């Protein structure tokens, strides 16, 4: 749903991610075209593309560099809370 634009990441959630990842808000928009930034050029992502994407590999590598298991667990919980099924879980 996020990829298709049916659900959007709230500003507060985006701010929370920037603090956790220690990156500026613009980090999430780097490399996007103007159409992608304003939501007019959204394309669905297929599982095979997702697994092979550079972003996925970066996320997996960053995740495994976190030494503290509790921090890793909290990160997974945060990411799940951002997903399309999050509303159904609460």
Image (spheres, grey):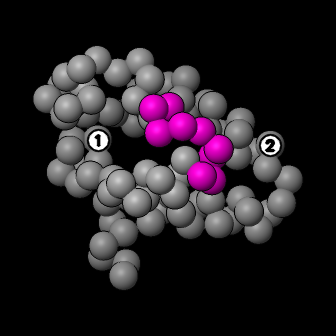
Between 9 and 87, the one nearer to me in the picture: 9
Q: Is residue 43 visible?
A: no
Residue 4: percent from the left, percent from the top?
21, 41
Between 72 and 20, the one nearer to me in the picture: 20
Between 85 and 29, the one nearer to me in the picture: 29
SS type, badge 2 = helix
SS type, badge 1 = loop
- Report the side of 31 relative to 34 (left or right): right
Residue furthest out toward the left: 40
Q: Is residue 22 magenta-colored?
A: yes
Q: Is residue 49 magenta-colored?
A: no
Q: Are marks 2 and 1 in contact (CB under 8 Å)?
A: no
- Report the side of 49 relative to 24 (left or right): left
Instruction: Classify mark 2: residues with Cα within 10 Å, few (<14), some (14-19) or many (20+).
Output: few
Disc number at residue 24? none
Classify 4 as above or below 90. above
Residue at x 61%, y 30% (from the top left corner): 57
Residue 45: percent from the left, percent from the top?
32, 33
Residue 48: percent from the left, percent from the top?
42, 30
Q: Which residues are magenta?
A: 19-27
Instruction: Classify mark 1: residues with Cα within 10 Å, few (<14), some (14-19) or many (20+).
Output: few
Q: CA distance from mark 2 to mark 1?
A: 26 Å
> Which residue is the site of mark 2?
65
> Which residue is the site of mark 1?
3
- Report the side of 76 relative to 9 (left or right): right
């Amino acid at each position: 749903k996020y990829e298709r634009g049916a659900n959007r990441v709230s500003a507060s959630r985006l701010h929370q991610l920037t603090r956790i990842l220690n990156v500026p808000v613009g980090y999430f928009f780097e490399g996007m075209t103007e159409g992608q930034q304003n939501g007019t050029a959204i394309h669905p992502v297929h599982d095979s593309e997702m697994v092979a994407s550079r972003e996925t590999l970066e996320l997996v590598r960053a995740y495994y560099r976190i030494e503290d298991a509790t921090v890793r667990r909290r990160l997974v919980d945060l990411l799940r809370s951002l997903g399309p099924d999050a509303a159904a879980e609460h």
